[in-house]
Image (cartoon, rainbow, N blue to C red):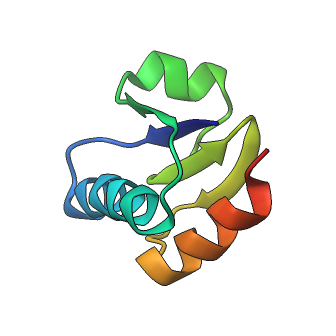
Amino acid sequence: MKIEIFGSNCIKCERMQRNVRNSLLETGLSAEVLEVNDPDVMTSRGVMAIPTLIIDGEVVSKGRLISIKELNGILKRLQP
C-alpha cells in the first residue's frame, strides 16, 4: 500500500501525518508513507487543497483532516 500525504507544514497537514501513522499502528497494516510538500509536484498531480490524502492512486480526502477512526475504516477497505 502506498499512502501519499500532500501538504505543507501546516497544523492540519502535520495532524494528518500523525493520524495516518497512528492508524497504521492500530490496524496493523504496513504502507509506504510519502509526505509531498513540493508545490510543483502538487500542482502537477492536480492537488489544489491541503491536506490531500491519496492511497494507491485513489484520492481519499481533499482539504480536510481525517480522524484516526475514519482512516482505520478506509485503510481496511483499501487493503490488498
Q: Residue 71, percent across and down?
A: 55, 69
Residue 18: quadrant of the picture: bottom left
In which quadrant of the rendered image does the C terminus lie?
top right
Residue at position x 44%, y 56% in the image: 24
Q: Of residues 70 and 42, which is closer to you in this image? A: 70
Q: Is residue 14 left or right of residue 29?
A: left
**Residue 49 makes an appearance in the image:** no
Q: Residue 27, percent across and down?
A: 50, 65
**Residue 15 makes an appearance in the image:** yes
Residue at position x 48%, y 58% in the image: 28
Q: Of residues 63 and 22, which is closer to you in this image? A: 22
Q: Residue 61, percent across and down?
A: 62, 61
Residue at position x 57%, y 44% in the image: 48
Q: Is residue 11 left or right of residue 64?
A: left
| Number of numbered labels in the structure image | 0
Q: Is residue 15 above or below residue 37?
A: below
Residue 11: quadrant of the picture: bottom left
Q: Of residues 57 and 22, which is closer to you in this image? A: 22
Q: Residue 30, percent across and down?
A: 50, 42
Q: Of residues 4 and 42, which is closer to you in this image? A: 4
Q: Is residue 69 above or below residue 25?
A: below
Q: Is residue 61 left or right of residue 24?
A: right
In which quadrant of the rendered image does the N terminus lie?
top right
Residue at position x 35%, y 54% in the image: 21
Question: Which residue lies most toward the front here?
Answer: 28
